[in-house]
Image (cartoon, grey):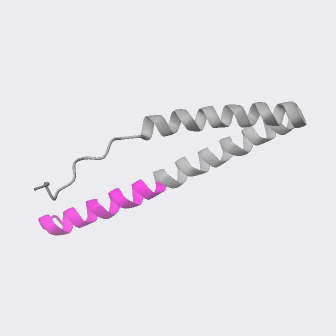
Amino acid sequence: MRDPTPGRAPNFTGACIVMFGVNLGWVLLLLFAIYGLIAAVFLGLVVNHWLNWLETRRRLAEQAFDSMNRDRHRSASGDHS
């Protein structure tokens, strides 16, 4: 009989980041070959802006989560200072 609990899933984060870079590279090269340097640089700047936006959004979500957990921990421990 098979064990009903599944094992841990492999972590594909590193592979995903590498493939994102590979795909971004060939897209930029293709764009450069078809439309020139200005279009490739513009797309690079757009992707950079998008990644910065994602990082800021993630940081704000983590701060809100940490603050919520800190408040919950204080109220559970009876520390009202």
- Residue nearest the observer in this picture, 41 or 52: 41
Assign the magenta stretch its main secondary structure: helix
Q: Quadrant of the C terminus?
A: bottom left
Depth check, front residue: 79 or 13: 13
Task: Tell me residue 35's x, y (percent).
Answer: 89, 37
Tell me the quadrant of the picture where the N terminus can be found. Answer: bottom left
The number of callouts visible is: 0
Any magenta on residue 64?
A: yes
At 13% across and 54% down in the image, what residue appears? 3
Q: Toward which corner of the image does residue 46 lie, by quadrant?
A: top right
Residue 79 found in image quarter = bottom left
Q: Is residue 79 left or right of residue 34?
A: left
Task: Determine whether, in the image, residue 39 is placed left or right of residue 21.
Answer: right
Note whether 11 is above or below 37 in the view shown.
below
**Is 19 situated above or below 60?**
above
Q: Is residue 27 left or right of residue 14?
A: right
Q: Is residue 71 left or right of residue 79?
A: right
Q: Residue 63: x percent and y percent?
A: 41, 55
Farthest front residue?
1
- The front one of 67 and 36 is 36
Query: Farthest residue toward the right?
Result: 35
Magenta span = 60-81
Q: Can you say whether 60 is above or below 45 in the image?
A: below
* Residue closest to the far left: 1
Residue 81: in sight, yes or no?
no
Provide residue 50's location: percent of width, then percent of height: 64, 48
Q: Position of residue 23 (x, y in %)?
A: 64, 36
- State the residue at coordinates (48%, 52%): 58
